[in-house]
Structure formats: C-alpha cells, structure tokens
Amino acid sequence: MLITCKFGGTSLACSENVRRCAQIVKADEGRRYVVVSAPGKKDKQSKKVTDLLYECHANRFDEGVFNALFGQIRAIFQEIGSLVKNFPIDEELDVIYNQIKFSESNIDFVISRGEYLNAKLFAAYLGYTFLDATKFIRFKNGELDLPATLEKAKEIDKDGRYVIPGFYGLNKNGYVKTFSRGGSDITGSIVARMFDCDLYENWTDVDGIYVSDPKVIKNAKKVAQVSFRELREMSYMGASVLHAETLMPIYEKRIPIVLKNSFAPELSGTEILKKRTEVADGEVITCITGKNDYTCIQISKMLLDKQLGFVKKATAVFEEYHINISHTHSGLDNLCFFVENSEYKEISFEAFLKELESRIDADKIVGHDKIALLAVIGHNLSGKIGVLAKIFNALQENAINVKTIYQSISECNIIIGIENDQLKPCIKAIYDKLIG
Ligand code: ASP
C-alpha cells in the first residue's frame, strides 16, 4: 500500500518529536512520501517557526530585533539538527538568514523557509531524498494550478522515497508562493494524488476529529468516520480540522485520508472517506460547530417570484465590491445574504447597505450584524426524523433566540443563525441534546 504521510508542526517541534515521527515512517514500508510543516510550538510558551519568520520579515530593517528573532529560529533548528550527524545546519541557517535579511525576498519566500529546512533535515534523518515543492507545485492567479502541478509531477521518479516541504510552490513568474495558513495539508493531498497513493495519513497532535471543539465541550466525542462532504462543511464552518481546500486534489480519485495522533500512533484516528461505510445510529452527527461575525442582509421585494433577474442584479453589487457571499436563504418576497465581516474590505457594511439600496429596486433592505452561524453536520440529516425537533428543544430550553434556520440541500447540514455571544452556549445546548 502506497502512503503519503504529512506531519504537522507540533509533531515535528523538537528532536524528541521528530524521532517519534521517524519511527512512524519506518514502521510501514509503504510510507514513501512524507510532507512536513515547519516546526510548531513545543510548549505553550514557544512560538511556531512560521510565526517567527513573519516577525523576522516585519522587522528586517531593525537589526537588533531581527537577530533576536532569527536567533530563536536558529535555536529550534539546531536542537532538531542535533539528531542528524554531519548535517550542515549552521550553513543552511546562514544562507536563509542572508536571503531573508539582505535580499528583496517576497514575504511568501520568507515564510516558506521553515518547511524548506525542516524537510531537508527530516530527509537527511530518514535517509530519504529531499524533493522541493517548487519542482512541481504551480500557482495561477494566486490559486493552486492543479493541472499544471500534475503535469510537472510527471517528471518526478515515482520509485523514490521523498520528504517534501509543505505550504508552498511557484507562481507563474517563478517566485515562491504559499497557500494560506495550514496549507501543508493541501501539499499532502497533492502528493498523495500525484503518486497515486492508496492512503493519505495526516499526523497531528490530536486523536482524530471530535464532534465539537474540545475547548467548548469537555470530553467531546471522537468520530470514527467522516465523509468528504461532511469534512468540507466542517472546515468551511470553522471546525479547525484540516485546511478547507485539502480535499480538492484527491476528491476525484477518492483517496481516503486518515487523521492520526503522532503522539499516540496506536490509536485508530478518524477516517475521511468519499462515503462513510458505517453509520451506526449514534454516529449520525459528525460535527457541531460554528463561526462568529457574520452580517445578514435581508432584501424584501413584493412579488419577488415574478421579478426576472432581480437576484442577479443584487449579487452583481456584491461582486463589484469583491464581497463573497457565504450563504443565501430565500423565501417568498425575501432574500437573505450572509457575509463574513472580514469581506468588507473595500467598503464598510453600512456604506454597502446604502449602495445596495441605491442600486436595486427593493421595498426594504435591512442589515443585521453580530450574527453567528452554527452548523450541525451529519449523515443524511434530512432523512432522519427528530433531529430538528431535538435542536429546537435544546434552543427553547436554553432560551436561545434563533434568527434563521436552514437545512442545506446537501442533506448533511443544518445551519442556525444566532447572536454572536450565544454561539458557545448554543453549541453546548445542542451537543447535550443530540450527543448527550
Ligand atoms: N507552517 C504553516 C503554518 O503555520 C503551514 C502549515 O503548517 O501547514 O500555517
């Protein structure tokens, strides 16, 4: 069985952790392709290398601060480097120091150096070949160019055993370009696809996927299996499981993912499959999660059902201001658009409402802010009798006022709009009712 394994930052934060991950790789002959993040936090006080690199870049004109920050990066890598005899760790660090201090380096190049050096080190430690992601990962207009990436990947000898840095590739101009934060998950997925792997193992510091964030629900239940669709909904709605774009490269090939804990490799973890194979009754709900800080724009227009092109006119205004709509609900004579607050970059929420009023012939436009969206995600929710009843009971018993509720067409998602500050109590109330 051919396996791509990706190790997250905490799993590789210090030499002891790196040794543990190496044992995992060596325990299965099939683990030929390894993707790494930059070293993460070893303990609560320490910083992630990627964060330190960001700070280095911000302080590159202040020699004292820059050197102190780079000193922290140096210490982390020297400690890990102590594992590998004859690895020129100081020379490697000196090259990076000069590249990010004295050259005109773009920020993406700077923040990619954590993955780059970690992959080189881990490759040397394992006796694998270092394969730079710039050799095959391609971006176009700021996004992954999967066809170009897979085409480039054909040049790579499949018989090798590789360690590959996560998080970055090259853009059209030949400069290093990174994914958004946590993007090594996507690299792992690309690698699993290009080498036709049977499995993508994603090694982290948690035992798997929990129904709710254990910071909100103590002892939250772990789920054994999650479908691709459910994972997409979870990541999109704020559950920090895998990067939201992880599935894209492997979706078509249906390569399964297993999420495992590198600190407890004997545990089974959570499988992420195109379709769940077992759905016991107690395992219908896979996730209760949510996100704060949405606005809702409610547009009313009498005889909306007879107005050809009205929705198009409204959404064109959003498009013009580059405001991405997260969700829409519609009713007779009413339309609701939910937008994340962070989308109002070019124009404020208030100014946008005014603009919309002047551009479309609505009877009334009302804006609501400080909205949280909570999602209950699970298998075939629309086919299950009683889920909604339980949710409503939980909300009523806890005096939570619902602004909107919506069961998505994908049949695996119920979305509830509430006030921002009710999100955590609401998750708790619904969890207690549905999971117990
Ligand atoms: N090191 C990057 C981050 O901290 C990318 C990753 O770990 O996936 O976001």
Image (spheres, rainbow, N blue to C red):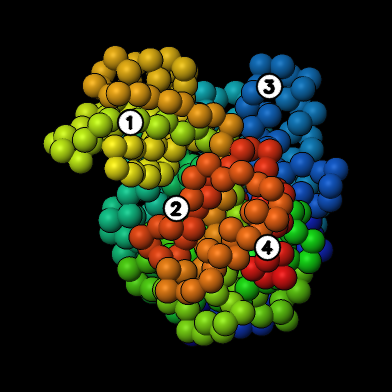
Give the labeled residue for mark 2. Answer: 406
Disc 1 marks a residue whose amino acid type is: Ser
- First along the sequence among labels 2 and 3: 3
Give the labeled residue for mark 1. Answer: 300
The residue nearer to you, when weighing 215 against 18, is: 215
Total labels: the figure holds 4
- First along the sequence among labels 4 and 3: 3
Task: State the SS at label 3.
Answer: loop
- First along the sequence among labels 2 and 4: 2
Q: Nearer the viewer, mark 2 or mark 3?
A: 2
- Give the class, few, some or many, for how many residues have Cα within 10 Å of label 2's Cα (few <14, many ≥20): some
**CA distance for labels 1 and 3:** 50 Å
Give the labeled residue for mark 4. Answer: 431
Instruction: Tell me if 68 is positioned left or right of 412 in this view.
Output: right
Q: Nearer the viewer, mark 4 or mark 3?
A: 4
Image quarter where the C terminus lies is bottom right
Instruction: Tell me if 270 is positioned left or right of 199 in this view.
Output: right
**CA distance for labels 4 and 3:** 45 Å
User: What residue do we see at 56% from left, 84% from top?
Assistant: 280
